Image (tube, rainbow, N blue to C red):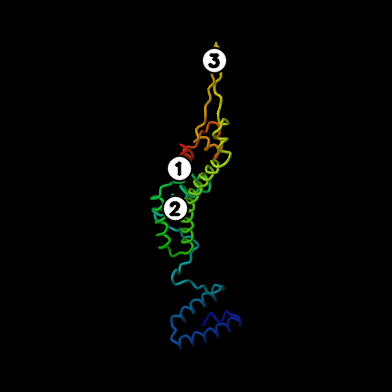
């Protein structure tokens, strides 16, 4: 072969050993394997590098990253879980987490179906994290409501109840004297709803007002104990 004349002794010995290997492969009827090895070997000799073996499944080498594609329904589900549940749980906005059980079950069912159909273990793990975040958000909402109820129950069984319902939450709004011996005084007493709201969440900032969702929660708890 002409290529041998341009090779050094080391390369010549490699070719000799390789010829023996090819001969054995042909004798064992591994013709296709021998052909592949011959092509790879001579390419390495000509290029001065090592033989490059490519996967038969995807023989074309590429450095591009393949983007994972999700269905529109799955993307919509993940977006709702993130925006309506996980973010609000992370920001401790428990009263803003939806209380719609049908909506929760719909999202949960979609994630369970996606987890069961997914073969990629990494994606399956991410889907499971999304499902756990959804469930955790709903549980945190329930725990927040239970904690508020316990706080109110505690206030009713301690001296704080007497302080809230006593004259300490009475504000003198108007005081004046008439032309005779009569005096006029007007006091306003905070509703238990707002008293317990302040006890739980503190006085709202100036100009902000009472949070309607928190008021609804306090009202439901007080109604449970027949306070309002």
Instruction: Examine the rendering and report whether any part of residue 72 can be seen.
Output: no
Numbered-mark total: 3
Of circles 2 and 1, the one toward us is 1
Q: Which residue is mark 1?
A: 224
Apparent side of residue 89 relative to residue 8 in the rendered image (left or right): left
Mark 2 residue element:
helix
- C-alpha separation, residue under disc 1 versus residue under disc 3: 43 Å
> How many C-alpha atoms fall within 10 Å of the one at disc 1: few (<14), some, or many (≥20)?
few
Of circles 1 and 3, the one toward us is 3
Q: Earlier in the sequence, mark 1 or mark 3?
A: 3
Q: Which residue is mark 2?
A: 78
Q: Which circle marks residue 7 in the picture?
A: none
> How many C-alpha atoms fall within 10 Å of the one at disc 3: few (<14), some, or many (≥20)?
few
The answer to which image quadrant residue 174 occupies is top right
Q: Position of residue 210 (x, y in %)?
A: 50, 35
In front of the other: 196 or 118: 196
Q: Earlier in the sequence, mark 2 or mark 3?
A: 2
Q: Which residue is mark 3?
A: 182
- As displayed, is residue 1 above or below residue 81? below
- As displayed, is residue 49 above or below residue 107? below
In front of the other: 100 or 64: 100
Q: Position of residue 213 (x, y in %)?
A: 47, 40
């Amino acid at each position: 072969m002409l290529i041998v004349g341009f090779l050094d002794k080391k390369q010549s010995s490699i070719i000799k050993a390789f010829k023996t290997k090819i001969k054995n492969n042909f004798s064992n009827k591994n013709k296709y394997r021998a052909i592949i090895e011959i092509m790879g070997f001579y390419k390495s000799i000509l290029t001065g590098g090592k033989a490059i073996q490519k996967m038969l499944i995807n023989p074309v080498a590429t450095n591009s990253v393949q983007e994972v594609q999700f269905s529109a329904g799955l993307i919509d589900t993940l977006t709702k879980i993130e925006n309506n549940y996980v973010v609000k749980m992370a920001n401790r906005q428990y009263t803003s987490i939806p209380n719609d059980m049908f909506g929760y079950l719909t999202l949960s069912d979609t994630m369970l179906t996606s987890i069961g159909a997914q073969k990629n273990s990494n994606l399956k793990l991410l889907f499971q994290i999304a499902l756990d975040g959804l469930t955790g958000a709903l549980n945190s909402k329930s725990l927040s409501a239970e904690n508020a109820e316990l706080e109110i129950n505690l206030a009713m069984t301690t001296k704080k109840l007497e302080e809230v319902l006593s004259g300490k939450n009475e504000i003198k709004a108007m005081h004046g004297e008439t032309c005779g011996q009569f005096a006029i005084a007007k006091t306003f007493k905070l509703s238990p709803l707002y008293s317990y709201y302040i006890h739980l969440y503190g006085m709202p900032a100036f100009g902000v007002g009472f949070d309607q969702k928190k008021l609804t929660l306090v009202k439901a708890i007080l109604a449970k104990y027949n306070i309002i």
